[in-house]
Amino acid sequence: MNNFTYYNATRIIFGRKTEYQVGSEVKKYADKILLHYGGGSIKKYGLYDRVVNSLNEHGIQYIELAGVQPNPRVSLVRSGIQICREYNISFILAVGGGSVIDSAKAIAAGVPYNGDVWDFYSGKAQIKECLPVGVVLTIPAAGSESSTSSVLTNEDGWIKKGTGSELIRPVFAIMNPELSFTLPAYQTACGAADIMAHVMERYFTNTLDVDFTDRLCEATLKTVINNVPIAIKNPEDYAARAEVMWAGSIAHNGLLGTGREEDWASHRIEHELSAIYDVAHGAGLAVIFPAWMKYVYKHNIPRFVQFAVRVWNVENDFQNPEKTALMGIEKTKEFFASIGLPVSLKQMGIGDDRLEEMADKCTNGDTKTQGGLVKLKKKDIIQIYKMALE
Amino acid sequence: MNNFTYYNATRIIFGRKTEYQVGSEVKKYADKILLHYGGGSIKKYGLYDRVVNSLNEHGIQYIELAGVQPNPRVSLVRSGIQICREYNISFILAVGGGSVIDSAKAIAAGVPYNGDVWDFYSGKAQIKECLPVGVVLTIPAAGSESSTSSVLTNEDGWIKKGTGSELIRPVFAIMNPELSFTLPAYQTACGAADIMAHVMERYFTNTLDVDFTDRLCEATLKTVINNVPIAIKNPEDYAARAEVMWAGSIAHNGLLGTGREEDWASHRIEHELSAIYDVAHGAGLAVIFPAWMKYVYKHNIPRFVQFAVRVWNVENDFQNPEKTALMGIEKTKEFFASIGLPVSLKQMGIGDDRLEEMADKCTNGDTKTQGGLVKLKKKDIIQIYKMALE
């Protein structure tokens, strides 16, 4: 186990009707806020009214910035920063899923910064100061509601990049599983792939002596695997939605990575896909992760055997661990397919014409590697894209 | 799953040599502190010197209050409060295990309070304000380093009571598993029983639809069960000590209880034992918990079956779930015995002469019940003590 520091101060307010508490929570931080959200779904299902009523009840002024898209764009973030400065706003409330939250985090970090907010994503600058962000979560997927990360897309070159800082961790996250009842099956499945990927990026490590966090990872994966099919079949199953929502937060709040090197190659490889083709991040992960597994598993067969046996209940073939490992990968792919996700680039309508371009961007022109379990170069990433084709 | 709020802002600084960071951590909060510890063990093994050097390097003044005993006493806490007031101290640094930390928390809550600190434990008052507490942990057991609870013993009547508040959660916990290398086998085993009990108090619930936290509980129990025997056999096995230390914190930091009713009868029943007989809390739990299980398991056989199968790998006898449930209880008891703990009151030299007195104290003269899974009255608790006799 490696040394680590762990600090997570997001207040989780979880359960039925908790969105009615949003005004009293916000009031602890500010009287004037930016209310940030996406499209019309929060209006369609009444959430918008409940949030706004609660803010009004507590005398909180809000200025709205709607229009966050999946794979959120830096241009909208820049508008948000300008609004906050102009109106002297010191708190951002994100109502939505990972895209809205990531966008809110970017605004919050950008307001007190002198340069352009993209600097935090391009690696040119580090976040040193940040406005507080609060969340009303509607989509269990990104885990952004209590994570230190934010991912943005820059339309100038369609570059998708992430940044991380303890400072951008939301101060509270209101999580009512009922708010996810209206999520269509496909989006529910994409969320599941994202949550599972967050766990697997931490699970596949060469760090030894990580028994406890291994087991916590396996517990989280099994919870998602058991409950997502129920939520897809019966969208208003509170129990299943609640399990997935809570697991989705823990998957990415840092706990599961304590004391271990993490991987993150699959996420980076997927980011290139969704930057260019604007596919759903979860769907992209469902395609990329099994391909990545097949490309790297030989580097650490015991870990892939443990994954197969403990997560997927594959019976261990003691004479042939490789076979067991491959069964685990196959089960992962089968699961993604069973919940309606694509498992090949072809199924997403993506051909082989830009693979090299994506691998090149992913490795900064082959100047840096991706991944912890295996350090992947441009040529490796091209191979992984190729394995994902069909 | 029940609604819940979860907030845990203890900064965990985990790993080898982390105690050298104590001065820089404390410096964020105060320049003058109370240095609180127990007996001579921290001096014997050099930890005291390392802590004091680090404090000196950062120009932090400290006043020492040593002498915390296992089952910490309110009298020493009162002295600590007086010292803090007299010297205008605004930070308590606890160097030790659960007793030292619980004592430090009591001092921290007592300083800004006008009445007597015992009021928080007797239930007469709620904690409304508290000095910050920092921890250098030496014993993985109580989980007090990132928990909201503190347990004290009042010598006036030998009453042992707990209190709880988010305000007393330590602001940081420095956790170097090497510091537990010198723990004798018996104390290591007592710690294991305490950690397991913290998980089991949460695990045995009637709340339905708690799949995720069930699995997190099982992960934590399995980690302790696998690693404690290694740590006992080879006290300097860093990996095993680290697993146990991190699991011990998570076991009691609140995460595993999110969304579920908890039990806590065994803890309360044990408190009466250690108040009167001054036995180690963990040893008392090893005796009481299996007896409690045998007394209550019929109220929720499926849960005890799940415990047996998932935690102890008992093969499920589908035709006879009760048999499976009983096997799980037997395995628990066998495990405690295997790591050198007593599993009967007799082994601790305790007879049947004060059982009624303890059951009476535990239920406030039969005016209140204990436990969540089954609400136990005085007569039930007497039976549990009796079942624990041999």
Image (cartoon, coloured by chain):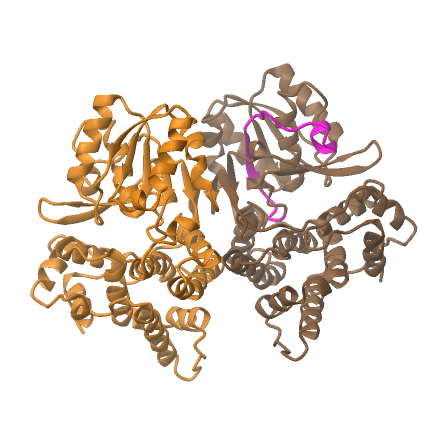
Chain colours: A orange, B brown
Q: Position of residue A221 (x, y in %)?
A: 42, 62
Q: Position of residue A256 (x, y in %)?
A: 42, 53
Q: Is residue B121 magenta?
A: yes
Q: Position of residue A51 (x, y in %)?
A: 37, 36
Q: Residue extending furthest left?
A: A353
Work out whether residue B166 or residue B334 is closer to the camera in this orientation and state it.
Answer: B166
- Residue at 19%, 26% (x, y): give it: A114
Question: On the rendered structure, is A72 left or right of B34?
Answer: left
Q: Quadrant of residue A294?
A: bottom left
Q: Which residues are magenta?
A: B119-141
Question: On the rendered structure, is A9 left or right of B364?
Answer: left
Work out whether residue B184 or residue B128 is closer to the camera in this orientation and state it.
Answer: B128
Q: Position of residue A164 (x, y in %)?
A: 29, 42
Q: Quadrant of residue A109?
A: top left
Work out whether residue B327 or residue A53 is closer to the camera in this orientation and state it.
Answer: A53
Q: Is residue A118 visible?
A: no
